Amino acid sequence: MKIEIDQENIRIDKFLSKKLDYSRSIIIKMLEKGAILVNGKIVKPSFLVHYEDSIEVVKEYEKESTLKPNEMCLDIVYEDNDIMVINKPAGVVVHPGSGNHENTLANGLLYYTENLSDINGDARPGIVHRLDKDTSGLMLVAKSNKAHEILAEDFKVHAVKREYVALLNGVFPSNEAKIDAPIGRDPKNRKKFMVTSVNSKEAITYLKVLKRYKKHTLVSLNLETGRTHQIRVHMKYIGYPVFNDPVYNHQVIPNVGQFLHSKTITFIHPITKKEMFFSSSLPKYFLEYLQTLE
């Protein structure tokens, strides 16, 4: 491609991120590896393009993925060329981690399609955000890098709205509550989090009671922030932990999932700019257990 007169003095990484279907971080790697040349030469990402410069993409930026496709029954709520909305079951890990590299949602997505964003690297194709292993419900997946970049920013500024439904231990007394308590890692267990003022980040959760039972409360939860384990940590902190939470609640019944579900999601489509809204039913085990409480 040739640089036009009105395109001068723009950083090449910024310029190409708008011209190619690659993220800026991927373009920087391409420049460093010599996969993109300007007038036949390798340039730095900070290079400013000039009138009539010739830019050549000499090869596709590819690297062998260590993530293996794995057949999985995906509950796809919505799909187009740029995004997918997945209804994730409880018990499924979103992306590879310690001890689990083959049975994650990322493996299943890669088996279903190779058209997934690569901004978060080979191990997390299409993954814009995550749900905890034992949390069920709606998740957004990016198929194109452009969609991924826009959605990631939307999550950062809290423009993506999600409603969770949870069953709590105990009868919560108020109809509504705002939990404003910072969250950081538990110094005694690095895999857990806790409300603390030490090395913590702001965390705000809004709670609304949907129904009270004899020993439980069904609630709707909305997050102003998106910290790891936020709902589970905040519910334990106020003394009404999520029922059957294997990490933050000692009262656990076997062979049943965690009673926390990402029920609705509302967002602006990153490409069409239309408002999108999706809702999902509570898992079967969740509904059946609620019937036993009547």
Image: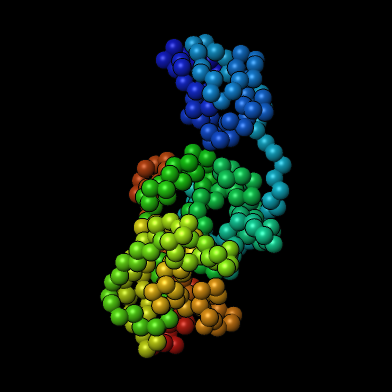
Relative vertical location of residue 127 with respect to residue 13 in this rendering, above or below: below
* Left or right: 281 as drawn, with respect to 46: left
Total marks shown come to 0
Question: Where on the picture, by quarter, is residue 93?
Answer: bottom right
70 sits to left or right of 205: right
Q: Nearer the viewer, residue 195 or 16?
A: 195
> Quarter of the image holding residue 273?
top left
| Residue at x 68%, y 53% (from the top left corner) | 69
The x, y position of residue 268, in whole percent, is 37, 47
Nearer to the camera, 60 or 204: 204
Q: Position of residue 53 (x, y in %)?
A: 54, 13
- The N terminus lies in quadrant: top right
**165 to the left or right of 76:** left
Along the line of sight, the residue nearer the viewer: 52 or 198: 198
Quarter of the image that includes the C terminus: bottom left
243 with respect to 133 (left or right): left
Q: Residue furthest left?
A: 175
Residue 180 image position (x, y, % from top left): 35, 63
The answer to whether residue 33 shows anywhere in this view is yes
Rendered position, 173 above or below 199 = below
Residue in the image at 44% along x and 66% along y: 195
Q: Is residue 228 above or below residue 174?
A: above
Q: Along the line of sight, which residue is nearer the eye, 25 or 109?
A: 25
Q: Is residue 77 visible?
A: no
Can you tell which quarter of the image residue 290 is in? bottom left
Q: Residue 208: x, y in percent?
A: 31, 71
**Residue at (69, 51) in percent of width and height:** 67
